[in-house]
Amino acid sequence: MEMMAQLPSRISRIVLVGFMGAGKSTVGALLAQHLRWQFLDADRVLEERVGASIAEIFAKDGEAAFRSLESQVIRDLLSRSGLVLALGGGAVETQTVREALQNTQETCVIFLEAPLEVMIARCEHQPGADVRPVLNDRGQLRRRFDSRLPHYRNAHLVIKTESLTAEETSLHIFNAVNSLLKENAPA
Ligand code: S3P
């Protein structure tokens, strides 16, 4: 676990960022159980609000329309406390999302890092691989990954997940956050 940016002095929500297949949703749900917090996946909230799947939104309205909805949903969700929130892999492409992550108080952003090939392989082994429109555009994956990397690395903590199970990753985060909360707690 690598510490990148100064952590907030109090943490009321944890946001997981990283590329498709990083394990954000699986790890997020486990972490929320450890913390006894709520877990939400921003993509699922978006799909419920819009009443359409992400693949349908991409096909009908295009990626720009999806990014705008995604940004709105994430900014709304960042007002909640006691929340572990998993973002879609491309959310950090949008400047308003990046600004909201930086400017929302008491928010700890965690980057789940793994090699691109490992994450693509994980996605391929998941049921419904075809529900990720960005995954189908193979030629662009490396470019997307490279351009997102600096934004992912603006997180407070980076955790390399390649050789960890989702449960191990969630426990690493749980322990790191717990101890940091104690270190930062007022005397
Ligand atoms: C996307 C990742 C997806 C989803 C959408 C676009 C991307 O989320 O938001 O299909 O641009 O990388 P996951 O990272 O949860 O697969």
Image (cartoon, rainbow, N blue to C red):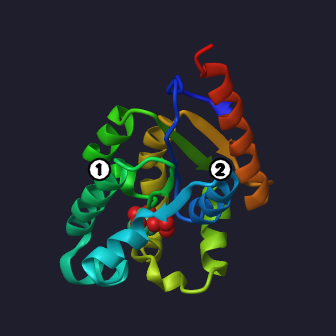
Indicate the quadrant where residue 120 lies. bottom right
What residue do we see at 54% from left, 86% from top? Answer: 128
* Camera-nearest label, 2 or 1: 2
- Say which element carries label 2: helix
What residue do we see at 64% from left, 65% from top? Answer: 26
Dot 1 amino acid type: Thr
Quadrant of the image where one finds ligand 1: bottom left
The disc label shown at residue 35, or none: 2
Q: Position of residue 138 (x, y in %)?
A: 47, 71
Up/down of 111 relative to 155, above or below: below
Q: Which of the two residues, 30 or 117, is positioned nearer the viewer here?
A: 30
Q: Is residue 16 visible?
A: yes
Q: Is mark 1 within 8 Å of ligand 1?
A: no
Residue count near mark 2 (Cα–Cα under 10 Å), binned few <14, some 14–19, many ≥20: some
Label located before the other in sequence (2 or 1): 2
Residue 58 is left or right of residue 9, and the answer is left
What residue do we see at 42% from left, 73% from top? Answer: 44
State which quarter of the image contains the C terminus: top right
Q: Which of the two residues, 43 or 174, is positioned nearer the viewer here?
A: 174
Q: Position of residue 18 (x, y in %)?
A: 53, 53
- Say which element carries label 1: loop
Q: Position of residue 104 (x, y in %)?
A: 35, 36
Up/down of 9 relative to 156, above or below: above
Residue count near mark 1 (Cα–Cα under 10 Å), binned few <14, some 14–19, many ≥20: some
The disc label shown at residue 94, or none: 1
Dot 2 amino acid type: Leu
Up/down of 38 relative to 112, above or below: below
Indicate the quadrant where residue 98 lies. top left
The disc label shown at residue 118, or none: none
Q: Are marks 2 and 1 in contact (CB under 8 Å)?
A: no
Q: Which of the two residues, 14 or 124, is positioned nearer the viewer here?
A: 14
Q: Is residue 140 visible?
A: no
